[in-house]
Image: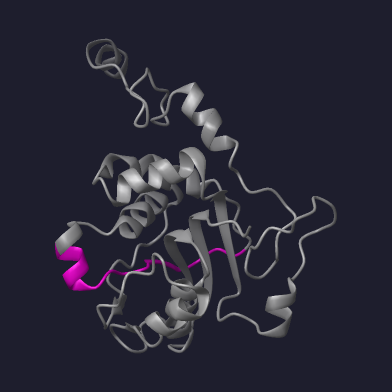
Amino acid sequence: MLNSLLDILLPRLCLLCGDDARDDGFCPGCAALLSEKLISPPVCSRCGEPFPDSAGPDRECGACISKAPPFLSARSAYSYEGAVQDAVHRLKYAGETGLAKPLGRLLSRLPMRLAPHKVVPVPLHPKRLRERGFNQSLLIAGALCNELGLRLEGAGLERTRDTEKQTGLGADERRKNVRAAFRVRKPGSFKGTRVLLVDDVYTTGATLMECARAIAGDGAEVVALTLARAMRV
Protein backbone atom coordinates (compact mmCIF):
# COMPACT_ATOMS: atom_id res chain seq x y z
CA MET A 1 0.00 0.00 0.00
CA LEU A 2 2.83 2.38 0.86
CA ASN A 3 4.53 1.75 -2.49
CA SER A 4 1.24 2.34 -4.33
CA LEU A 5 0.74 5.62 -2.47
CA LEU A 6 4.27 6.74 -3.26
CA ASP A 7 3.71 5.91 -6.93
CA ILE A 8 0.72 8.27 -6.93
CA LEU A 9 2.47 11.09 -5.05
CA LEU A 10 5.91 10.59 -6.58
CA PRO A 11 5.49 8.66 -9.86
CA ARG A 12 8.49 6.76 -11.14
CA LEU A 13 10.17 8.51 -14.04
CA CYS A 14 12.33 6.88 -16.68
CA LEU A 15 16.00 7.56 -15.96
CA LEU A 16 16.71 8.06 -19.64
CA CYS A 17 13.77 10.07 -21.03
CA GLY A 18 11.68 11.21 -18.05
CA ASP A 19 8.46 9.41 -19.07
CA ASP A 20 6.54 7.18 -16.67
CA ALA A 21 8.79 4.28 -15.73
CA ARG A 22 8.34 0.67 -14.72
CA ASP A 23 9.88 -0.88 -11.61
CA ASP A 24 13.19 -1.35 -13.42
CA GLY A 25 13.68 2.42 -13.75
CA PHE A 26 13.01 2.66 -17.48
CA CYS A 27 9.87 3.35 -19.51
CA PRO A 28 8.70 0.64 -21.94
CA GLY A 29 10.14 2.54 -24.91
CA CYS A 30 13.63 2.94 -23.43
CA ALA A 31 13.56 -0.63 -22.08
CA ALA A 32 12.84 -1.80 -25.63
CA LEU A 33 15.74 0.28 -26.99
CA LEU A 34 18.05 -1.30 -24.41
CA SER A 35 16.80 -4.79 -25.23
CA GLU A 36 17.59 -4.23 -28.92
CA LYS A 37 21.27 -4.07 -27.97
CA LEU A 38 21.39 -7.39 -26.08
CA ILE A 39 24.27 -9.53 -27.31
CA SER A 40 23.04 -12.84 -28.70
CA PRO A 41 24.95 -16.10 -29.18
CA PRO A 42 27.10 -17.43 -30.61
CA VAL A 43 29.99 -15.72 -28.83
CA CYS A 44 33.54 -16.75 -28.02
CA SER A 45 33.33 -19.09 -25.05
CA ARG A 46 36.45 -17.46 -23.60
CA CYS A 47 36.44 -13.69 -24.29
CA GLY A 48 32.78 -13.22 -25.21
CA GLU A 49 33.43 -11.69 -28.62
CA PRO A 50 30.27 -12.14 -30.75
CA PHE A 51 30.73 -14.07 -33.99
CA PRO A 52 29.56 -12.24 -37.14
CA ASP A 53 27.21 -15.07 -38.13
CA SER A 54 24.27 -16.29 -36.09
CA ALA A 55 24.84 -19.99 -36.66
CA GLY A 56 26.55 -22.57 -34.50
CA PRO A 57 27.33 -22.89 -30.81
CA ASP A 58 29.59 -20.78 -28.62
CA ARG A 59 33.24 -21.62 -29.27
CA GLU A 60 36.67 -20.11 -28.81
CA CYS A 61 37.67 -17.42 -31.28
CA GLY A 62 40.96 -17.51 -33.14
CA ALA A 63 42.56 -14.88 -30.90
CA CYS A 64 41.85 -16.86 -27.72
CA ILE A 65 43.03 -20.10 -29.30
CA SER A 66 46.24 -18.35 -30.28
CA LYS A 67 46.76 -16.73 -26.87
CA ALA A 68 44.47 -17.53 -23.96
CA PRO A 69 43.42 -14.50 -21.89
CA PRO A 70 44.07 -14.48 -18.12
CA PHE A 71 40.39 -15.03 -17.29
CA LEU A 72 38.31 -18.19 -17.60
CA SER A 73 35.55 -16.33 -19.42
CA ALA A 74 34.28 -12.84 -20.11
CA ARG A 75 30.73 -11.86 -20.99
CA SER A 76 29.02 -8.58 -21.87
CA ALA A 77 25.27 -7.98 -21.72
CA TYR A 78 24.84 -5.32 -24.42
CA SER A 79 26.55 -3.85 -27.44
CA TYR A 80 27.95 -0.42 -26.66
CA GLU A 81 25.76 1.73 -28.87
CA GLY A 82 22.43 3.53 -28.93
CA ALA A 83 20.52 3.70 -25.65
CA VAL A 84 23.13 1.60 -23.85
CA GLN A 85 25.95 3.98 -24.77
CA ASP A 86 23.78 6.93 -23.75
CA ALA A 87 23.08 5.36 -20.36
CA VAL A 88 26.76 4.62 -19.71
CA HIS A 89 27.83 8.12 -20.76
CA ARG A 90 25.24 9.73 -18.52
CA LEU A 91 26.35 7.61 -15.57
CA LYS A 92 30.07 7.96 -16.19
CA TYR A 93 30.47 11.49 -17.47
CA ALA A 94 27.32 13.36 -16.40
CA GLY A 95 27.30 11.97 -12.86
CA GLU A 96 23.80 10.46 -13.10
CA THR A 97 24.61 7.83 -10.49
CA GLY A 98 20.95 6.85 -10.15
CA LEU A 99 21.47 4.82 -13.33
CA ALA A 100 23.93 2.46 -11.61
CA LYS A 101 21.30 0.45 -9.74
CA PRO A 102 19.04 -0.38 -12.73
CA LEU A 103 22.06 -1.02 -14.95
CA GLY A 104 23.54 -3.34 -12.34
CA ARG A 105 20.18 -5.09 -12.11
CA LEU A 106 20.20 -5.60 -15.89
CA LEU A 107 23.73 -7.00 -15.72
CA SER A 108 22.69 -9.42 -12.97
CA ARG A 109 20.36 -11.14 -15.45
CA LEU A 110 23.28 -12.31 -17.56
CA PRO A 111 23.70 -16.07 -16.93
CA MET A 112 26.87 -17.12 -15.11
CA ARG A 113 28.13 -20.66 -15.52
CA LEU A 114 30.51 -20.37 -12.57
CA ALA A 115 29.39 -18.93 -9.22
CA PRO A 116 31.99 -16.50 -7.80
CA HIS A 117 33.17 -16.22 -4.22
CA LYS A 118 33.92 -12.48 -4.49
CA VAL A 119 33.00 -9.63 -6.82
CA VAL A 120 35.69 -7.08 -7.65
CA PRO A 121 35.13 -3.87 -9.65
CA VAL A 122 37.83 -2.44 -11.91
CA PRO A 123 39.34 0.31 -9.72
CA LEU A 124 40.05 3.94 -10.52
CA HIS A 125 43.28 5.66 -9.51
CA PRO A 126 42.70 7.84 -6.41
CA LYS A 127 43.34 10.99 -8.46
CA ARG A 128 40.70 10.03 -11.05
CA LEU A 129 38.31 9.01 -8.27
CA ARG A 130 38.65 12.44 -6.64
CA GLU A 131 37.99 14.13 -9.98
CA ARG A 132 34.92 12.05 -10.83
CA GLY A 133 33.62 11.57 -7.31
CA PHE A 134 32.64 7.94 -7.82
CA ASN A 135 33.70 4.72 -9.52
CA GLN A 136 30.94 3.67 -11.93
CA SER A 137 32.19 0.07 -11.98
CA LEU A 138 31.95 -0.12 -8.19
CA LEU A 139 28.38 1.24 -8.27
CA ILE A 140 27.31 -1.25 -10.94
CA ALA A 141 29.05 -4.12 -9.12
CA GLY A 142 27.35 -3.15 -5.86
CA ALA A 143 23.93 -3.22 -7.49
CA LEU A 144 24.70 -6.60 -9.06
CA CYS A 145 25.77 -8.00 -5.68
CA ASN A 146 22.56 -6.75 -4.05
CA GLU A 147 20.52 -8.54 -6.69
CA LEU A 148 22.42 -11.84 -6.52
CA GLY A 149 23.46 -11.90 -2.87
CA LEU A 150 27.17 -11.94 -3.71
CA ARG A 151 30.08 -10.60 -1.69
CA LEU A 152 31.49 -7.28 -2.92
CA GLU A 153 35.23 -6.81 -2.48
CA GLY A 154 35.30 -3.14 -3.39
CA ALA A 155 38.87 -2.39 -2.36
CA GLY A 156 40.55 -5.71 -3.12
CA LEU A 157 42.28 -4.47 -6.25
CA GLU A 158 44.05 -1.13 -6.69
CA ARG A 159 45.34 0.91 -9.61
CA THR A 160 48.95 1.82 -8.92
CA ARG A 161 49.47 4.33 -11.74
CA ASP A 162 47.38 7.25 -12.94
CA THR A 163 47.27 5.97 -16.49
CA GLU A 164 46.35 8.02 -19.53
CA LYS A 165 42.68 7.84 -20.48
CA GLN A 166 42.08 4.89 -22.81
CA THR A 167 39.66 6.83 -25.03
CA GLY A 168 41.25 7.49 -28.41
CA LEU A 169 44.07 4.96 -27.96
CA GLY A 170 44.55 2.00 -30.29
CA ALA A 171 44.62 -1.59 -29.05
CA ASP A 172 48.41 -1.78 -28.68
CA GLU A 173 48.54 1.63 -26.99
CA ARG A 174 45.81 0.56 -24.57
CA ARG A 175 47.74 -2.55 -23.59
CA LYS A 176 50.93 -0.57 -23.00
CA ASN A 177 49.04 2.12 -21.10
CA VAL A 178 47.67 -0.25 -18.43
CA ARG A 179 50.52 -2.75 -18.29
CA ALA A 180 51.32 -3.60 -14.64
CA ALA A 181 48.98 -0.80 -13.52
CA PHE A 182 47.01 -2.96 -11.06
CA ARG A 183 47.84 -5.02 -8.00
CA VAL A 184 46.06 -6.93 -5.28
CA ARG A 185 45.91 -4.75 -2.18
CA LYS A 186 46.52 -7.62 0.26
CA PRO A 187 48.62 -10.39 -1.36
CA GLY A 188 47.08 -13.81 -0.79
CA SER A 189 43.58 -12.46 -0.16
CA PHE A 190 42.23 -14.03 -3.37
CA LYS A 191 44.12 -17.31 -3.19
CA GLY A 192 41.90 -20.31 -3.88
CA THR A 193 38.83 -18.23 -4.77
CA ARG A 194 36.85 -17.53 -7.93
CA VAL A 195 36.60 -13.80 -8.55
CA LEU A 196 33.99 -12.03 -10.67
CA LEU A 197 35.60 -8.94 -12.20
CA VAL A 198 33.11 -6.20 -13.15
CA ASP A 199 33.52 -3.19 -15.45
CA ASP A 200 31.22 -0.92 -17.41
CA VAL A 201 32.53 -1.39 -20.97
CA TYR A 202 34.73 -3.96 -22.71
CA THR A 203 36.52 -2.14 -25.53
CA THR A 204 39.70 -4.03 -26.43
CA GLY A 205 39.83 -5.96 -23.16
CA ALA A 206 43.20 -4.44 -22.19
CA THR A 207 42.07 -3.14 -18.79
CA LEU A 208 40.08 -6.25 -17.88
CA MET A 209 42.96 -8.52 -18.87
CA GLU A 210 45.48 -6.56 -16.82
CA CYS A 211 43.18 -6.65 -13.79
CA ALA A 212 42.55 -10.37 -14.31
CA ARG A 213 46.28 -10.99 -14.61
CA ALA A 214 46.90 -9.36 -11.22
CA ILE A 215 44.11 -11.32 -9.53
CA ALA A 216 45.05 -14.63 -11.18
CA GLY A 217 48.64 -14.02 -10.08
CA ASP A 218 47.34 -14.02 -6.50
CA GLY A 219 46.05 -17.57 -6.97
CA ALA A 220 42.45 -16.99 -8.02
CA GLU A 221 40.26 -18.00 -10.95
CA VAL A 222 38.78 -15.00 -12.73
CA VAL A 223 35.55 -14.56 -14.68
CA ALA A 224 34.55 -11.16 -16.02
CA LEU A 225 31.28 -9.32 -16.67
CA THR A 226 30.76 -5.97 -18.34
CA LEU A 227 27.56 -4.11 -18.96
CA ALA A 228 28.48 -3.35 -22.56
CA ARG A 229 30.96 -4.27 -25.27
CA ALA A 230 32.30 -2.12 -28.07
CA MET A 231 31.56 -3.96 -31.30
CA ARG A 232 34.23 -4.44 -33.95
CA VAL A 233 33.45 -2.82 -37.26
Q: From the viewer's perspective, tell me whether residue 68 is left or right of residue 188.
A: right
Magenta-highlighted residues:
114-130
Vertical comparison of 54 with 204: above or below: above
Q: Is 130 placed left or right of 156 in the picture?
A: left
Q: Name the image quarter holding the C terminus.
A: bottom right
The picture places residue 183, in percent across and down from the top left corner, at 34, 84
Q: Where is residue 34 in the image (x, y as percent from the top left)?
A: 52, 36
147 is within the stretch colored magenta: no
Placement of 106 over or under 170, stated as above or below: above
Could you tell me which residue is drawn at 38 percent across and 56 percent down?
141
**Figure quadrant of residue 102:** top left
Residue 219 position in % (x across, y down): 47, 87
Residue 36 horizontal/vertical position (percent): 60, 36
Q: In which quarter of the image is residue 177?
A: bottom left
In the rendered structure, the answer to whether residue 43 lies left or right of residue 57 reads left
Q: Residue at x 20, y 58 (%)?
A: 132
